[in-house]
Amino acid sequence: MPIYEPITTEFGVKPLVVVLDIGTAFTKFGFTGEFAPRHIIRSEVRCKRTCQMKKLCDYESSQDLYDFLVDFIHMIYFEYALISPKDRPIVIVESLLCPTLFRDTLAKVELFKVLFLQYEVSAMLVVPSHLVCLASLAIDTALVVDVVCFGLPIVQAWQALPLGGESIHRHLKTLLNASNTGVKNLPEDVIENIKVMCCFVTKKSRADQLALPRTDMVPPPDVKFPNRGVETLMVTGKTREKAFEILYEEDNDHLCLSTMILDAILQVDIDLRQTLAENLVLIGGSSMAPGFKARLKEELLKQLAEDRYKVLNIKEFKFHAGPYKENYAAWLG
């Protein structure tokens, strides 16, 4: 079978519509009509000047970003998708809050040079990620919490804090260095694997005890994690339990994940507040951590007792359970 043979039906050729979601850490690629992406790959490409792998967001100029995106899109089509882009429409899922330079360069590269002139695609549609994620839930009103790699936006009455997967990685690295003498500069993929396979979000009551100087609580079991077959890292139970606490610790302005959600609800009309509280949608890979939803609900209910949030008069919070994993919710929509 030829590598570029299109899918055919009894009525003729049926072109596949490509769906591409380029994230800060990972990129999702697939086709419309499918229930999951074909590939989830790291958003990185080999730099021609240094011959090293670099993230798409680690560009020094607009020309660097342009070159990265040209190579990255070429890699997706000819190494992973194995299809011809000619006469094939494409849907781009983008975040409304990503840097303007990235959005403009991405549109320019794909629209004028890579897709239309070089690859001869038939059409391109750009859709906002925080809107289309509601399509798979069949709802039109919700408060979207996107726990992405860098930053954590909430739309529609939007709030943003520098919290997300990257802040969890930094906090986890600090905890690992404290419990593993001589271990420094762990690669990002090792940190991510430890976060995914070993860490979890603990209960509010245990988190309060962990914040005390001394506690009699029995910690979870320690885990010996192999570091690429070279050495073994000791991931203590305390480290496993405290890795995600950075999301719930209030800063000097009394802001954290739960207060940010409540502040967003405060900005909308009174008639919509209870509706939004009962339609919370979590997307982003970091929200897949065990115990994330339960702890977030605890924090929200606790914050309602504060004087500044009593005016909300919210009785309960409800989370949607979609037919997807949170890390590709926007792609599926």
Image (tube, rainbow, N blue to C red):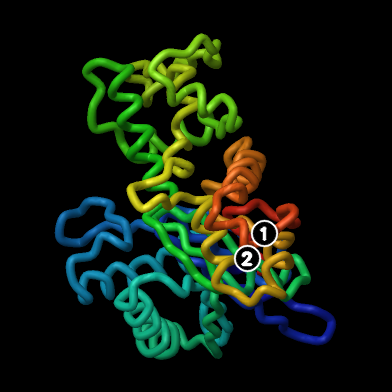
- Identified at 47% across, 63% down, the residue is 153
- Identified at 30% across, 77% down, the residue is 101
Q: Reply above or below: 195 against 111.
A: above
Disc 2 crowd, CA 10 A, few/some/many (<14, 14-19, 20+): many
- Identified at 58% across, 39% down, the residue is 289
Q: Reply above or below: 145 against 222.
A: below
Where residue 143 is drawn, which disc sits there? 2
Q: Position of residue 259 (x, y in %)?
A: 51, 53
| Element marked by disc 2 | strand
**Residue 261 can be seen, yes or no:** yes
Near-viewer residue (274 or 322): 274
Near-viewer residue (176 or 85): 176
Q: Position of residue 17 (x, y in %)?
A: 63, 77
What residue occupies the far front of the structure in this picture? 307
Q: Is residue 304 left or right of 55 when viewed as pictured?
A: right
> Which residue is the site of mark 1?
280
What residue occupies the far right of the structure in this picture? 10
